[in-house]
């Protein structure tokens, strides 16, 4: 996923059409957004160059991606059942959002033929959110204490947190950013 942003109970997810994640979301019309914290950099990096696609696309293989059936296992993560959607939540993530697809928007419709439909903005409706109790703002059932929640933030293929400086190098930063351009 290249991007995600929220307004109210909606999220917009920026995804490439050719990814297995995108295919799964389109097929099931459901997903779980598992938001990792700063201390989960190693788990995220363990997944960075993997794909659920059995036949790894040439463009991904050239960037060092490999097929991995058991992504939970290689990242040392634990799947837990969601309540309202079929995809699992990740137990170790402090925040999970169960969501259902509302709409899918193709980007670059007015661009060159090779770009048309290759990137999607998928709008999802958040059906249920799970937050560790210790991250809640005291006195509020539905507010996060920003001094306690420290999510991973990726900026130009590097991981940052909500403290000064970069947390760690991302495994994806070893791929030339230009290789993603069509």
Image (cartoon, grey):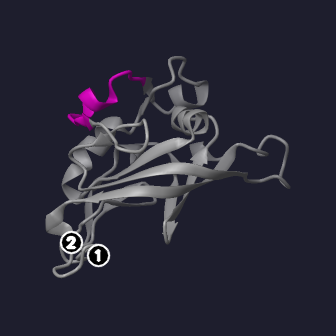
What residue appears at the point 19 percent right and 68 percent down from the top-left corner?
135
Q: Position of residue 111 (x, y in %)?
A: 83, 53
Q: Nearer the viewer, residue 174 or 9?
A: 9
Between residues 20 and 112, which one lies in front from this camera angle? Answer: 20
The magenta-colored residue range is 67-79
Can you give x and y, in whole percent of width and height, for residue 68 in the image? 38, 23
Identify residue for label 2. Answer: 136
Alpha carbons under labels 2 and 1: distance apart: 6 Å
Residue 67 visible to the viewer: yes
Query: How busy is the neighbourhood of tag 1: few (under 14 within 10 Å), some, or many (20 plus)?
Result: few
Q: Identify the residue at the far front of this view.
A: 84
Residue lying farthest bottom? 139
Crowding near the residue tagged with mark 2, few <14, some 14–19, many ≥20 C-alpha atoms within 10 Å:
some
Magenta residue check for 24: no
| 102 or 104, nearer to the observer | 102
Q: Secondary structure at mark 2?
A: loop
How many numbered marks, from 0 up?
A: 2
Residue underneath mark 1: 143
Is residue 86 depicted above or below 103 in this figure? Answer: above
Position of the C terminus, as image quadrant, is top right
Please name the residue shown 26% across and 37% down the image. Answer: 80
Q: Are marks 2 and 1 in contact (CB under 8 Å)?
A: yes
Residue 182 visible, this orientation:
no
- The question of residue 73 being in magenta is answered with yes
């Amino acid at each position: 996923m290249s991007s995600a942003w929220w307004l109210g109970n909606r999220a917009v997810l920026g995804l490439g059409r050719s990814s297995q994640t995108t295919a799964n979301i389109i097929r099931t019309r459901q997903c779980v957004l598992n938001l990792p914290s700063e201390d989960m950099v190693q788990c995220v990096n363990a997944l960075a160059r993997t794909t659920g696609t059995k036949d790894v696309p040439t463009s991904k293989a050239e960037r060092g991606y490999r097929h991995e059936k058991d992504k939970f296992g290689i990242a040392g993560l634990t799947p837990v059942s969601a309540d309202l959607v079929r995809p699992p939540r990740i137990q170790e993530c402090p925040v999970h959002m169960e969501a259902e697809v509302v709409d899918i928007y193709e980007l670059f419709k007015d661009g060159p033929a090779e770009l048309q439909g290759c990137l999607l903005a998928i709008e999802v409706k958040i059906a249920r959110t799970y937050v560790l109790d210790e991250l809640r703002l005291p006195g509020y059932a539905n507010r996060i204490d920003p001094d306690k929640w420290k999510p991973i933030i990726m900026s130009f293929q590097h991981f940052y947190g909500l403290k000064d400086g970069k947390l760690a190098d991302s495994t994806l930063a070893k791929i030339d950013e230009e290789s993603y351009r069509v």
